[in-house]
Image: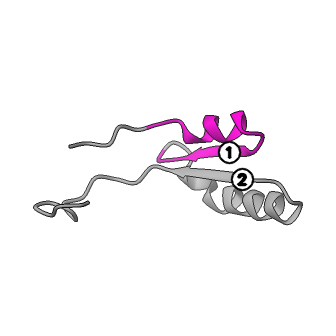
Amino acid sequence: LCIQFCEYETVAVGYGGKGVKLDRSNQDQMKQVFAEAQKQCSQGNSYLINCYIGKTSFREGSISV
């Protein structure tokens, strides 16, 4: 079973929040992304960071329920 990537940052906007995707294409902006998230949250805004992580064998052979 493989969980597909989803644009959760777009879903957050649909619910009235703000969001951003963080992946290898903008990993050099990680500090700025987190700073903006903290700023938005301190102003009472919902903010979602959709962080794409690399594939690993961490869960290989395990069963999740």
Q: Is residue 64 left or right of residue 41?
A: left
Q: Splitting the image into 4 quarters, where does residue 42 fall?
A: bottom right
Q: Does the magenta stretch include residue 9?
A: yes
From the top left corner, tell me how far across and down residue 56 is, in percent: 24, 58
> Relative to 15, does residue 39 appear above or below in the rendering?
below
> Relative to 51, does residue 58 appear above or below in the rendering?
below
Q: Which residue position holds label 2?
A: 47
Q: Is residue 21 left or right of residue 33?
A: left
The image's mark for residue 3 is none
Q: In this view, does 56 lie to the left or right of 52?
A: left
Of residues 51 and 17, the one nearer the viewer is: 17
From the top left corner, tell me how far across and down residue 3 is, in percent: 32, 43
Q: Splitting the image into 4 quarters, where does residue 59 fall?
A: bottom left
**Secondary structure category for the residue under label 2:** strand
Mark 2: few/some/many CA within 10 Å (<14, 14-19, 20+)? many
**Secondary structure category for the residue under label 1:** strand
**Residue at far right of view:** 43
State which quarter of the image contains the C terminus. Answer: bottom left
- The span from disc 1 to disc 2 (Cα, nearest Å) is 5 Å
Q: Which residue position holds label 1?
A: 19
From the top left corner, tell me how far across and down residue 15 is, in percent: 72, 39
> Relative to 1, does residue 10 appear above or below in the rendering?
above
**Residue at image point 70% right, 33% down:** 14
Mark 1: few/some/many CA within 10 Å (<14, 14-19, 20+)? many
Give the magenta-colored segment's residue range.
6-24
- Residue type (three-letter) at the residue carrying disc 1: Gly
Mark 1 and mark 2 lie on one chain; the one further toward the N terminus is 1
Label pair 1/2, CB-CB below 8 angstroms: yes
**Residue at image point 46% right, 37% down:** 6
- Residue type (three-letter) at the residue carrying disc 2: Tyr
**Residue at far left of view:** 61
State which quarter of the image contains the N terminus. Answer: top left
